[in-house]
Amino acid sequence: MKKPVRVAVTGAAGQIGYSLLFRIASGEMLGKDQPVILQLVEVPFEKPQQALKGVMMELEDCAFPLLAGMEGFDNPQAGFKDADIALLVGARPRGPGMERKDLLLENAKIFTEQGKALNDVASRDVKVLVVGNPANTNAYIAMKSAPDLPAKNFTAMLRLDHNRALSQLAAKSGKPVADIEKLVVWGNHSPTMYPDYRFATVGGASLKDLIGDEAWNRDTFIPKVGKRGAAIIEARGLSSAASAANAAIDHIRDWVLGSNGKWVTMGIPSDGSYGIPEGVIYGFPVVTQNGEYSMVRDLPIDEYSRTMMDKTLAELEEERAGVAHLLG
Ligand SMILES: NC(=O)c1ccc[n+]([C@@H]2O[C@H](COP(=O)([O-])OP(=O)(O)OC[C@H]3O[C@@H](n4cnc5c(N)ncnc54)[C@H](O)[C@@H]3O)[C@@H](O)[C@H]2O)c1
Ligand SMILES: O=C(O)C[C@H](O)C(=O)O
């Protein structure tokens, strides 16, 4: 039996938490032979703590063979102790009519505190995925608040955008999702993101040539993927949860177990590649192996793509400026 992996999850009593925890405990994230210990963090108020107890009772009632332990917490300093993986989901979700950046300052405080807690008590190799919005900037704040941990361990979730784009491309081209490779979503998890299938292939052939419809790309595909989160909120009255949890599982599974040579999109701190300033948490194409990701480099960037990539960067820079005063 392998040594259990400690997985900390914030916002554990929320809607994403409810779609996420049972799949982690059943082995879908880290493998069917990997025991896990869940460290579940919620805010220190009666209602969410009570709800968390209920979720833990349900986890217990599943009798998952891989669930080697679980504990509920009301603060990150205790909840992140020795965590190998931290899924930072807890945040205030946006409602109808709000943009993700409206949540910036409210959530900045949360991620400063959580970054510090990771710095103080988590495993020195902790892999951090920020799901709570605005995800890229929250990840940046946590990273900056954790100076003793490697910056590369802080990532933001663009996998939902990647998966949304994959499904749209599969529907347009009539090809199975599983056959589409080399897709990337550049930039911020916001409507400025740039889903880019210029390099994508199906069975080795160019997907762009197969689709052959640049007007669809620019006028339908890109805005549809960018505004999908808002469309879900509009339809459900609540933000996406099961698909977000699914993307979080995909992100961590690939990071830990490898993407087998496939490109996936992760929000990672830039190393200055593609003209994105160092440290900005930006969606890049990566391949993953042996628990590490590496950026796919030297892709040609045409004029339209440059404009799109700069636009989403400008928004991230604006968000970064908006929280600079909190980062000391
Ligand atoms: N990156 C993405 O692709 C993506 C996709 C969907 C949702 N989201 C974001 O994920 C976040 C969670 O969404 P949800 O639908 O689960 O929301 P939710 O309101 O159902 O649940 C959030 C939970 O987090 C808890 N929480 C708030 N602050 C916390 C803190 N400081 N520590 C611990 N727990 C805390 C709340 O008590 C609540 O139970 C939102 O910010 C949402 O916008 C991101
Ligand atoms: O759009 C939102 O606020 C929720 C989430 O980020 C999403 O993309 O579904």
Image (spheres, rainbow, N blue to C red):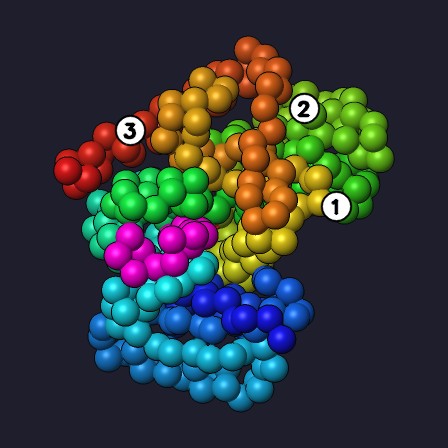
Instruction: Please provide percent x and percent y for residue 6.
Output: 45, 67
Instruction: Please provide percent x and percent y for residue 74.
Output: 26, 72
Q: Residue at x 54, y 78 (%)?
A: 67
- Choose top left, top right, bottom left or bottom right for residue 134: top left
The kind of secondary structure element at disc 3 is helix
Q: Amino acid at mark 2?
A: Arg
Q: Which residue is mark 2?
A: 198
Disc 1: CA contacts within 10 A as few (<14), some (14-19) or many (>=20): some
Residue 7 seen in the current view: yes
State which quarter of the image contains the N terminus.
Answer: bottom right
Query: Along the polypeptide, which appears first: circle 1 or circle 3?
Result: 1
- Choose top left, top right, bottom left or bottom right for residue 281: top left
Disc 2: CA contacts within 10 A as few (<14), some (14-19) or many (>=20): some
Residue 110 seen in the current view: no
Q: Which residue is mark 1?
A: 177
Quick one: which residue is furthest to the top in this view? 303
Cα separation between marks 1 and 3: 35 Å
Question: Does the numbered disc 2 mark a residue whose Cβ is under 8 Å from ligand 1?
Answer: no
Q: Amino acid at mark 3?
A: Glu
- Choose top left, top right, bottom left or bottom right for residue 197: top right
Confirm or deny contact between disc 2 and disc 3 (CB under 8 A).
no
The kind of secondary structure element at disc 1 is helix
Q: Which residue is mark 3?
A: 318
Cα separation between marks 1 and 2: 16 Å
Cα separation between marks 2 and 3: 28 Å
Query: Along the polypeptide, which appears first: circle 1 or circle 2?
Result: 1
Q: Residue at x 58, y 15 (%)?
A: 301
* Magenta segment: 118-132
Please name whichever residue, 252 or 101, is drawn nearer the observer in this view of the structure.
252
Count of labels in the image:
3
State which quarter of the image contains the C terminus.
Answer: top left
Q: Residue at x 25, y 45 (%)?
A: 145
